[in-house]
Amino acid sequence: MSENNIHDCSMLILLLPLLGAVVAIVLRQFRLGDHSHWPVIFGVGGAAFFALNILWMVLGAEVGQRSVQSVIYTWISTGAASSWFNFEFLVDPLSAMMLVTVTFVSTLVVIYARDYMRHDDHPERGYERFFAFLALFVFSMCTLVLAGNFLLLYMGWELVGLCSYLLIGFYYNKPSAAAAAKKAFLVNRIGDFGFGLGILLIYWTFGCLDYASVFHMIEEGVAAGGQALPEGRLAMIALLLLCGAVGKSAQLPLYVWLPDAMEGPTPVSALIHAATMVTAGVYMVARCGAIFTASPAVMTVVAIIGAATALFAATIALVQNDMKRVLAYSTVSQLGYMFLGLGVYAAGSAVFHLFTHAFFKALLFLSAGSVMHAMGGIIDMRKFGGLRKVLPWTYRFCLLGALALAGFPFFSGFFSKDEIIHHAFNQNFWLGMVGSVTAVMTAFYTFRMIFMTFHGPERIPEGVHAHESGKWILFPLGVLSIGAVFAGLVQVPGEKVNHFLEPAIHQFHAAHGLLLGAAGHAVAHGFWAEYGLMIISGGLAILAIGVAYLLHVRWEWLPGLLADVAPKTHRVLYNKYYVDEAYDAAVVKPLRKSGRICFGIDQYFVDGLVFMVTAVPRLLGAMLRSLQGGAMQSYGLTMVTGLAIIVLLVLLA
Amino acid sequence: MLDLLKNQLLFSGLLIAVLMGAINLGVAYCTFYERKISAWIQNREGPNRVGFFGLFWGFHFWGYGQPMADGLKFLLKEEMIPDKADKPLYVMAPAISFIVSTIGIAVIPWGGYLDIDADGIVDVACQVANPDIGLLYVLGVGSLGVYGVVLGAWASNNKYSLFGGIRAAAQMLSYEIPLGLAILVVVLSCGEVRLENIVRAQIEGGGTWNVFVHPLAFFLLFVTQLAETNRAPFDMAESEQELVGGFHTEYGALKFALFFLSEYTHMIINSAFLCVLFLGGWHFPWIPGLGLEDTAWWAVLAKMAMLGTKIAGCVFVYMWIRWTLPRFRFDQLMRLAWKGLIPTGLGLVALAVVMTYFGIPGSESVWPKLIWGLGGNAAVLFMVVLVVGMSPAGVTGRQANMPPISLLSPAKRVPRADQGTAN
Amino acid sequence: MNASLPYLIYALFAVGGAGIYLALPRSGRSTAVPGSILGLAAVGMFVAVVAKYALPSEGAGFSYLFSAMALIGAGRVVTHPKAVYCVLYFVLVIISVSMLLVLQGAEFLAIALIVVYAGAILVTYAFVLMLSQQSASVPGDVRSREPFLAVLAGFFTMACIAGQVGDLPLAAAPSSEQVIRLAQHGEADQAVMPEMMVDGNTAAMGAALMTKYVVTLETTGVLLLVALVGAMAVAKKRVPIEESPDPEKPLGQVGREAAPF
Amino acid sequence: MATEGQLVILGAALFAMGLVGFLTRRNLIIMFLCTELMFQGVLVNLVAMGKIHGQLDGQVFGVFLLAVAAVEAAVALGLVVLLFRRRGSLAPDVWAIMQG
């Protein structure tokens, strides 16, 4: 594997989308207008091509040679050579796989957006702005993934946050979108604050920020200057980093921004909040496995947060009526799975789930967008139904995505999710149980959505000309559905993905001797041990789909009855456990009140003091004002009078 | 009697008297010839009726009595001052105009030095005054010429007069610059500001008439003098088609006559300067008796006649141009001055400086001067034409609102409608 | 040198100042006649004082004449209510000063003064005046601002300075012929361009400008160029004509709104 | 007292009158004329002083003074025209307001 090639490809992956963004914006002056998707498609598509190229090269390299660190230039120099911060890239199996996922899905989303945004009849379309933001987002995400040290990682991290802010608030004159953007940004700030502190603590502890040195020192168990690591320092760092991951990946305390972020255009939802941005946290935890695995307590926290999030979000998704909102909570829930996977030392499985999830969730979001497109912007599932005749292709693609999400046997989601549950059971029975229950729920709410939307009697909102979307929209759906169906198969004969990722996340194994493969093999010998869980969870998924069919197609009266039977439960779930209200009461309102108090102090006490100070020049000014009437001849007269006095003094002296 | 004349002061006084009479007479007949020449150019007779006091019945002297009759008419008409006019200035303006245009004769060398009693000793200069700033005096007096026009225009309290006055002021200020540049070329090539010496430099040694060395400067000076005298094609100040009568709309009788006189006086004096600066003054080669050393009274008279002939020729060209060329539009006139004449003048000054640096004006032979001068002039002309040809012609006034005339003329650029930020 | 000379000069300025003060345009009853009489008296005093204390010299009569013309012209510039007449009287001042300069042997400067001032600057003033102000005088012109204080301050200062004229090294001042002669013999240590002085003032000025002051000359040329560009930039600017905020009360005498061509 | 002294007094008088005119007249153009009058006073003084010291420097400075006067007139008159177009008046008082 040639370093130069890797280096060049990395640069191109970064620069092509950036160039696309710049061209789209700059050429706006030259009336590029309705064609501004082309530079971005080429930019992001080129990035995808080179990402595949990198993956190819990484696959072709020797197992021990698969990690390449290349320095572009020295970014910040703090004097000592050891503490230079380089602009450096780290290409290894993990980042190669992430890159492919990100750029591939992004390319499809950009292609999809070409038609979707064109028919967007919003008053301020900002066509080229949208594509420029998309390209900028891909650039940011690639920076994050390729980063070879924590500082660059942090830069990508923040850039991603910024882009998500811009894209969620794309319809900036829509108040709810502006509020959602603000919310996303602020909630992310909370996480990023912890993340930033974590990075500072890393630097304080180890005196350097690049992955290789830091992980090496952790393996050696030493801090900067060869001293012993302070007690609990690694746990502290891990917790702080986790804080950032929780914010970015929408885990339990800080997940609230993600469902609201559906205010952005649907391609944005698909791109940022399903496939790529929210996976940054998962990626980061996987990348920093050495730090996390060094403190088992934190790993437990990760697992518990993941499991709780998965269950919690799934329950909310059960009763939501907004198609995109169901998908949003499902995303939160699936991210919870990934964290669960990370927490049970199955980082490979987590990343694999990330990989498959990117395909089917993007597919689902885009299908939802297609439905929304056809329904003239209406997304409430109660308002339409039986659309499978009207939108035949969208229905087919969406069904494939739903099957993958529900974990239907031999679809991609089935393999990856099952692996995580498998590892969870290995770690702790209750974690496994939560995973299984959530899987059932997932299958249920997914098909609830499908049945409500596409089955039953045909209902179309008034005044909407429902029609199947064009080929620009259907093509990405088709490609993604292929991924959603078959992406899981790369793992099947002998956990290839896990082995591929091993060198990158070897810290998980190295720290504990818990070699992933060994752990799997330790309990997985024998047919039932190996496949029993698969069969059971596959069966459960089919069962849940059947229940959803019964409830929402056969006995349509039953869901309402259920809601009536347990009104409180339904209301709590429907209102998302009142989390937003709780935050409002616990955080926002007190803050606002204290702000008002501070404002009062500032206005009456501080300003009063300042005013007393200003009163003196005011008085002086009132006295001297007559000297400055603005009439130049008065000035002249004053000047000449002064001259006369001076002349007189000189002559008399 | 002759001894008395040997005093330069008294001789100058005599000269003033003679010249004033001669120039006034000349002016009178200039107006006559103006009409004759215009008639000739327009293929008709012109004034041919008025004789002298009815002498010689039936014989009209080809109309030569006409100027006398005109003068008499001006004298006898009623003097009228408009009610709202600013009276002192209204009266003063024609006087200023006439005085300023007349006093220029003071420094013109009419005929070199005069040896009255033929004793071989030069007695007096045939020149009213010979200050060592002669040329600057010309410039100074010329620059005052605008006052008569401007004040008359303003004092008339008439809109058309004011337009004429403002045009005249702008025009005269603008054309004074190329005028000064053209004169500067002469100063540099002769190394003198004394008019007498400038004539001498064109005769003595390897000297030749400046017009042969600096033909472009001659042309420049001639054009600017046309403009300074407000003669066609530069008579914007009194363009009667637009402004009734320009700055003298409100004037009549003798005051108008003064403006009229001053215009023709200006013409004659300007021609005299043109001859002195470029055409060798009173000198003409190959004619005996017109040299520097000829100071006898008859030689001086011949020299004065020579200069008079040259002046008459120049005045004829003035009139010829007036009845041949159409008038400029005002913006064209300004553009000609600022974009055509001033750059040319600067180029010529640079040429003269270079020539001075290489010592060309002081050479004993004529040929280096001619070669350098003509070659340099050709180069300057070439460059000016090149630059002027490259600069796009400004489209002003009505032209801007007219549709393109043909496919060959550049189409007007259609302003792009603001398409907003729809895309 | 007479000790009473400074006091005579002070008196001269006092009388002149009083004359100017009275002659300045003012609302109410005009005091122009006593003002003019006082001013003329001051001019007469000036001539008398100069004649009494001056060394006899050639052309003194012309010198007095042109000085008086300059003073009267300047007085009228300051006091005349009509701006166009101010310009014309200023031309009179220019011509008088120029003649005085000729009498001093500064011919080049004299002609330059006429060409630049009378020929260019004042024509421009007249031009602008015509463009902006059609009527002979505007209300503001016939009422002066703070005349007493201004006259007091201005004339007091200048009287104090002019009173020092007796301290000038007048006795040592050579005539221009003396300067030339001294220069020819190399005895005038401060005479500039001595050999050039012989050829006349214009040549000497040319030599001085082109050798000792060549940098200053070039700088002045640059200054003129900058002013040319600046004037163009200022003049080309199209400004909207501000409406008077209160239509009842115009901002001032409104003349023509645009150039006539 | 020679004629140089006369010129010095004359210059002072011209300067004083220009100063008074500048301070008292209510017309921008006349005010500028009065500054030119002050220039004249200075010019006369320069020549006189140069003469007293037997130098040409005074006259040379007079030439530069002329150039400066021309510059001042060009720019100042341009500004006056601009101001006049804005307010339709030549009075300096309409510009006494501090803003705009």
Image (cartoon, rainbow, N blue to C red):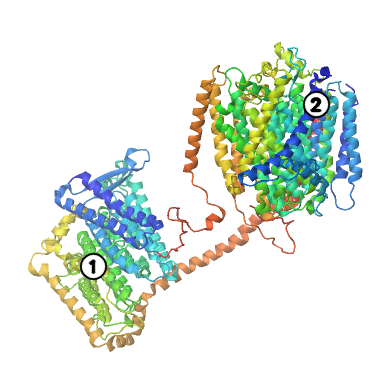
Residue depicted at 22% across the width and 55% down the height: A49
> Could you tell me the amino acid type at mark 2?
Leu
Q: Quadrant of residue A52?
A: bottom left
* Relative height, residue A113 to residue A377 (above, below): above
Q: Between residues A589 and B249, which one lies in front from this camera angle?
A: B249
| Residue D21 position within the rendered picture, expressed as x and y whole percent measured from the top left | 79, 43
Q: Residue furthest front?
A: B57
Residue depicted at 36% across the width and 66% down the height: A253
Q: Is residue A107 visible?
A: yes
- Quarter holding the C terminus of chain A is top right
Circle 2 is placed at which residue position? B14
Q: Between residues A276 and B27, which one lies in front from this camera angle?
A: B27
* Relative height, residue C25 to residue B122 (above, below): below
Circle 1 is placed at which residue position? A475
Q: Within 10 Å of the Cα at label 2, are there few (<14), some (14-19), or many (20+) other Cα atoms?
A: some
Label 2 chain ID = B
Label 1 chain ID = A
In 3D space, how far apart are the residues under numbered discs 2 and 1 (Cα atoms)?
110 Å
Determine whether, in the image, residue B75 is placed left or right of residue A151. Answer: right
| Residue A82 position within the rendered picture, expressed as x and y whole percent measured from the top left | 32, 40
| Residue C231 position within the rendered picture, expressed as x and y whole percent measured from the top left | 62, 44
Q: Secondary structure at mark 2?
A: helix
> Could you tell me the amino acid type at mark 1?
Phe
Q: Residue furthest top?
A: C185
Determine contact: label 2, label 1, CB under 8 Å: no
Q: Between residues C234 and A279, which one lies in front from this camera angle?
A: C234
Count of numbered tags: 2
Determine whether, in the image, residue A501 is placed left or right of residue B419. Answer: left
Q: Between residues D72 and A359, which one lies in front from this camera angle?
A: D72
| Residue A346 position within the rendered picture, expressed as x and y whole percent measured from the top left | 20, 61
Q: Secondary structure at mark 1?
A: helix
Residue depicted at 89% across the width and 49% down the height: C30
